[in-house]
Image (cartoon, rainbow, N blue to C red):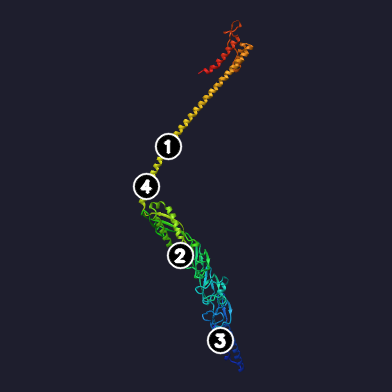
Amino acid sequence: MGVVIVIGLGLAIAIVVAAVKYPAASPGAAASLRAGAGVVALLVLAVSVVLSSVRLVGENQIGVVNKLIGGGSLAPGQIIATEGEMGPQAKILPPGWHPWLWPVIYEVDTPPLIQIKEGKIALLTSSDGQPLPPGEIYAPEWDESLLKRMAEDAEFFLTEGGGYKGPQASVLPPGKYRINPMLFTHEIVDVTNVKKATVGVVKSNVGDVPSGVGDTPDALVEKGQRGIWRQPLLPQEYYLNTKAYEVTMISTAKWVISYTGRDKAAEQREIPVRTSDGFDFPVDVRVEYEIRPVDAPLVVALFEDDGEKLRERLNSAVRAIFRNNAETVKALDYVQQRSQQESQSLVMLAEEMTKVGVTVTAVRIAGVAEDGSLDNLLKTQTDRQIADEEVKTFKQQQLAAEQKKELTRTEQEAEEERRLATARYQVQIAEQDKERRIIEASAEAQAISIKAEAQAEAYRVIALQIGSGNAALLELLKIVGERGINITPRVMVVGSNGGNAGTGGSTEATALIGTMLDTMISRQEPSAKP
């Protein structure tokens, strides 16, 4: 703005010179002209002086004022003036026109405002303020509600806000800020982004130091205290001062380390072991492990991160455990009990690594003696097993034969017992049948006897009434009726003088008897045929 004054002064001088040289009609007119020119020159000079004090601050600029003259000196150690002292002023100029800032008294600079993009933050360092508390290397964090005011109002920061000189623990999130560059310098850095399958372990350089921290290497502290926080940061973005809060990313994914000689690109070589019977051979092993979020701070406290130091500890434990386990068994038992060796090694390795925050989830033996060091031993063992199996088979066959023989004998004895029992039953049945027949025969004889006596008595009574001949004839007719005998005479019997034939019976009776005999013979003839 000093150029405006120079231009104004030049114009004023030009106006006066022109008025002096301008030809006047009379001395009075010349005097009037010169007087008017002097007034105009003074006005031009005054306007140029006023215009030289005006400063324009653009929309995306900051007006930084440095007072060159007047106002007194700053207090010792003070850099930014808060009460109009000579030197950099705490108050900045907002966008627009600002008068009365003459170049001789004030120096005004218009740097661009600070613009922080997404995914970035700004770290601040103050050139003025209270001295940091003893033992602190970062100023305490500002209250979140005062964050913008503390950053943009330097006068408030240095007075009511009680701001500290030096690195600030607070950071500026994405956005636009009108910060006095005479008070704050800034550094744009990335936000702290904790990705998936990862946690962030915070080592805080600010906060109170709890008692006991530092006594042991794995000591952890609560959030807000100085030291390694017990609670890690879960996956998301955080606005953290990466200098005041050192964040170590720890993977929570599952990892597999291969101890093998078959894959030349494997991270580790196979594990050589020696068994109790003196055999040396390599073992291919796969170890699966992970670091759980709750254990990540302990890992950082002991190993700084999940890298080389942690792997060295794990490798040492794996090799020692497999070697120690092999010393207690024989070579063949080791080969045959591989699953048992896996389980035993898993338990021991998990117990050992849990102490340092590592969770071992699986131990697998991929191969034993892949270099052929146990081929002869295994062949001998195979032959022996085959022989043992053959002996077992023979013994089983022999036992089966003996059991079959015993079964046959038992079956024969059972059959003999059955037959004997059957014979006994048959004897008992025969004796019972005999008794039955005797009883039936005796009963039948008695029945016949009783019937015969009854019939004889009845015949005697009838004979007394009608005569013996008629009684006999009556019995014959009764038999004819019961047996269906044809009584049509087929035999003619002729007697003398109508008397009895043969033995003196009647002719009719004789004829009837003949007919009956003929009928009986005719009924028996068919059964007599061959």
Q: Is residue 88 above or below residue 399?
A: below
Mark 3 Cα shell of 10 Å, populated few (<14), some (14-19), many (≥20): some
Q: Is residue 370 above or below residue 52?
A: above
Q: Is residue 527 visible?
A: yes
Using the rendered view, name the quadrant where residue 308 is placed: bottom left
Q: Which mark is residue 300?
A: none
Whole-percent x, y for residue 41 in the image: 58, 88
Judge depth for marks 2 and 1 and give the one in front: 1
Which structural element holds mark 3? helix
Distance from the alpha carbon under mark 4 to that under mark 1: 32 Å
Q: Which residue is mark 4?
A: 384
- Say whether disc 4 or disc 3 marks the residue closer to the N-terminus: 3
- Say whether disc 2 or disc 1 marks the residue closer to the N-terminus: 2
Q: Which mark is residue 406?
A: 1
Distance from the alpha carbon under mark 2 to that under mark 1: 74 Å
Q: Which residue is mark 2?
A: 302
Amino acid at the residue labelled 4? Arg
Amino acid at the residue labelled 3? Leu
Residue at x-position 54% and y-position 17%: 524
Amino acid at the residue labelled 1? Glu
Judge depth for marks 2 and 3 and give the one in front: 2
Which structural element holds mark 1? helix
Quarter in which the N terminus is drawn:
bottom right
Residue situated furthest right in the rendering:
465
Q: Which residue is mark 3?
A: 9
